[in-house]
């Protein structure tokens, strides 16, 4: 995806993805958190994610995680900023590869925020089924 590289975008734009007409969003996260550069656009490269600063305040965000679906995929950006009311300007590039249903699983994220309380656990993820926990 190529988009605005401002702090406002990284902190207040949310990416949402839904696979095969699921009732809930499978992915729902702030852009910065999802791409591993939470507060602002910093050049970052890992095996599965990349953030590249471009000229004129733009950024290229790449995600190489497989995200199988078999009927439909819906990807949206949502602007939650109270101050930055300009339309979100982003260009998506999607590579489609075929994954047999028997070899695939849905890509899912969980994001929540709030104040932590000393002595109380913070739930990282809770779900049913099989899959892989990739990281925090």
Image: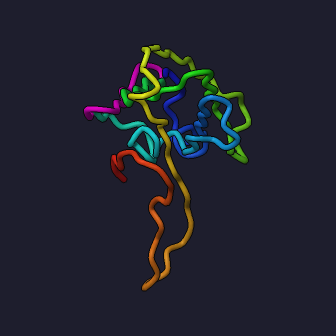
Q: Position of residue 8 (x, y in %)?
A: 57, 41
Q: Is residue 80 left or right of residue 5?
A: right
The answer to whether residue 21 is above or below residue 111 is: above
Residue 13 among those drawn in magenta: no
Residue 52 among those drawn in magenta: yes
Q: How is the image coloured?
A: rainbow
Q: Position of residue 29 (x, y in %)?
A: 55, 45
Residue for point 52% across, 51% down: 110
How many numbered marks have been drawn onto this rendered protein structure? 0
Residue for point 59% across, 31% down: 19
The answer to whether residue 48 is above or below residue 33 is: above
The answer to whether residue 79 is above or below residue 117 is: above
Magenta region: 46-57
Q: Position of residue 20 (x, y in %)?
A: 62, 29
Q: Is residue 133 left or right of residue 59?
A: left
Nearest the eye: 48 or 42: 48
Image quadrant assignment for residue 66: top left
Nearest the eye: 43 or 99: 99
Nearest the eye: 18 or 14: 18
Residue for point 49% across, 31% down: 5
Q: Position of residue 18 (x, y in %)?
A: 62, 34
Residue for point 30% across, 35% down: 44
């Amino acid at each position: 995806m190529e988009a605005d590289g401002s702090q406002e975008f990284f902190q207040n734009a949310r990416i949402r993805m839904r696979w095969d007409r699921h009732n809930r969003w499978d992915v729902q996260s702030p852009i910065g958190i999802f791409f591993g550069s939470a507060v602002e656009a910093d050049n970052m490269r890992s095996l599965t994610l990349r953030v590249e600063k471009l000229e004129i305040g733009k950024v290229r965000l790449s995600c190489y995680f497989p995200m199988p679906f078999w009927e439909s995929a819906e990807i949206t950006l949502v602007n939650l900023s109270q101050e930055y009311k300009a339309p979100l300007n982003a260009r998506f590039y999607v590579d489609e590869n075929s994954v047999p249903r028997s070899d695939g699983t849905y890509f899912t994220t969980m994001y929540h925020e709030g104040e932590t309380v000393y002595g109380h656990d913070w739930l990282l993820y809770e779900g049913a089924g099989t899959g892989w926990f990739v990281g925090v």
